[in-house]
Amino acid sequence: MIPFADLQPLPRQLRHPAVRDLAWVILSPPLLCQAPGPQRHPLHASHWAEDPQRLAAWLHALDQAPEPLLAWLARLTSRRLGLYYEALWQFALRQAPGVELLAANLAIRDGGRTLGELDIVLRDRDGDHHLELAIKLYLGPPASDGRDPQAWLGPGCHDRLGHKLAHLAGHQLPMSRGPQSRAVLAGLGLEQLQGHLWLGGYLFYPSTGDTYPPEGANPDHLRGGWLRQGDWIAQPGQRWQPLPRQAWLAAARLSAQDCWGTAQFEAWRTGLEPHAPAQLLARLHEQEDGAWEEVERVFLVADSWPDLPPR
């Protein structure tokens, strides 16, 4: 399923945050091994898949000179994590040898009504493909065993893994087969598309209880923990820091001057409102070069989560 398994440690070897995120997008494992539709890594049939060291060399070179990636990301007009994730994939697919990116965020309309978008339309040696991409972070239930995907909630409580899988199967993946899509695709000289999905992200397990992964989860999925504000216990010697939303992809790496001390973190934590939105925290460990790198991530949620008042 992942053509670059030997390169998974690579993101931590890179220094520029956007390049680390790009490498994470390409190399991180999918959340699922059993999905509601066929999964396919977007670079499955690229020349990089045949020679992973060629991909590694490209990422290392970009880490030294990230200007092309930064110029591409500067086009974003939204801080939404999903759009950032898609933009990173678009950059990789535009550069990937053996892959032709034919369209991205291709709008499908019925008269004046927008039905949706096709995230990615690409061509490689295996044919023409429609790819749906998603980055998701879900928190597991404290009061059930977790096997039901419907029990896994997004940190804002507006999204459930079960709902997302149903939407992928019932709406997003079939869209490229509809009559409105066929008309749009014909304008690009395309007829038959193979539909696939790629769902990346993390699953966060409660600090109490015995929660199992949801049905269909990839055994190698990325994971973290979650706990409520009132359950936080400071551990001597540990360094924690909140991560802004756009830093939720690759493991954080901070310079010494950007790394919070214990007092600064505790002042921030104790100043949180009781119904503050879920905060993603990284536990940091000092590296030999003096930088601080993430070794664990945890969501800190309100004591009443997921029963939050409307905002």
Image: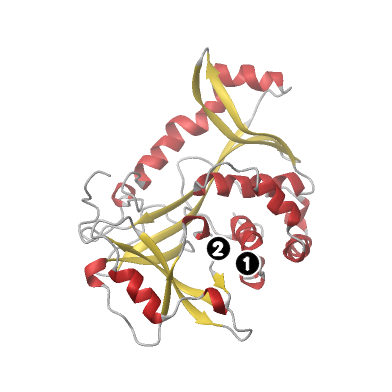
- What amino acid is at disc 1? Pro
Q: What residue is drawn where x is 53% and y is 73%?
A: 258
Q: What residue is drawn where x is 48% and y is 53%?
A: 33
- What amino acid is at disc 2? Ala
Q: Is residue 39 visible?
A: no
Instruction: Tell which residue pokes out farthest to the top in this image.
Output: 111
Helix, strand, or loop for circle 1? helix
- Up the image or down, 116 lies above or below 46; here it is above
- Pointers 2 and 1 in contact (C-beta within 8 Å): yes
- Up the image or down, 151 lies above or below 19; here it is above
Q: What residue is drawn where x is 43% and y is 71%?
A: 241
**Residue 142 x, y percent position in the rendering:** 24, 61
| Frontmost residue, 217 versus 232 | 232
The disc, 2 or 1, on the residue closer to the chain's N-terminal end is 1
- Up the image or down, 83 lies above or below 184; here it is below
Tag 1 residue: 11
Tag 2 residue: 250
